[in-house]
Amino acid sequence: MLNFYRKPALSEAELDNLLSEIKEFTDKVKDIKAEWNFNVEAERQLTSNELNILKWLLVETYEPWNLRDNSHFEHQNSTLEIGSRLSFETPFSTNAVNICRNCGVPVKRLERFIRYNLKLGSELTVGEKTHIYSLVHDRMTEQFYEKPLVTFEVDTKPEHVRIIDLISKGEEELRRINIELGLGMDEQDIKYYFDLFVNKMRRNPTAVELF
């Protein structure tokens, strides 16, 4: 995994607005800065020429000195890093990978994370941290990273196919699984899908089909 850090990630106005929002509930945060962290997974070790092309693609045209191999932040203990969940590739990565490959750089995935560095007057409470988290990330698509990312591989293993036995257990089984999986079926849905699988298709559905 290659990492490149570029500043600033947000404009001064955006940072000022964020700081103002934070100060509405705590005055412990005195200043805030932000930088991008580009996590790059290549198909193989890049040559020096390919590496130069990659860096050229990542720099800002008029400020190439703001891209570096290590963080711009001096103190890392008050840094929050936020990035996309690893289970899916973002549109940003898809576009970036296409551009890199068109330029001859064999990149597999390229995700851009944002890092916030907080200058604190005193230590934040758990509640204050939680509130700041809610301001700077989308919990549906993003997560926090306590350590630098070393791989895009995800440990999650898919579940085995689960067959829901409606033929033997009847409509009550569909009502039970409706609650267990949070499917949100009403009584009309239950009768419709029970009839569809048991009487018309004459087989049991999988959990995925019911979703």
Image: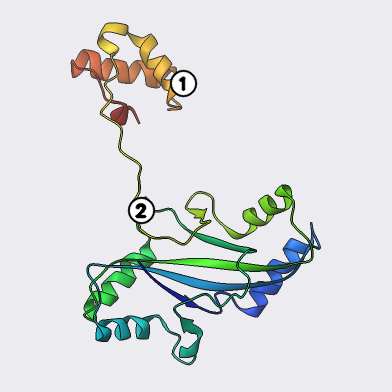
**Number of residues whose C-alpha sits closer than 10 Å to that of mark 2, classed few (under 14), some (14–19) or many (20 or more):** few
Instruction: Give the CA distance from mark 1 to mark 2.
Output: 28 Å
- What count of labels does the image hold? 2
Query: SS class of the residue under badge 1?
Result: helix
Q: Residue at x 60, y 67 (%)?
A: 76
Of marks 1 and 2, which one's residue comes earlier in the chain? 2
What numbered label is drawn on residue 199? Answer: none
What numbered label is drawn on residue 88? Answer: 2
Q: Residue at x 37, y 50 (%)?
A: 87
**Position above or below: 86 against 53:** above
Query: Which of pointers 1 and 2 indicates the residue nearer the eye?
Result: 2
**Number of residues whose C-alpha sits closer than 10 Å to that of mark 1, classed few (under 14), some (14–19) or many (20 or more):** few
Do the CB atoms of the residues marked 1 and 2 lie less than 8 Å apart? no
Say which residue label 1 marks.
179
Question: Residue 200: where, in percent of width, then height?
Answer: 20, 17
Question: Residue 8: where, in percent of width, then height?
Answer: 56, 79
Query: SS class of the residue under badge 2?
Result: loop
Q: Quadrant of the N terminus?
A: bottom left
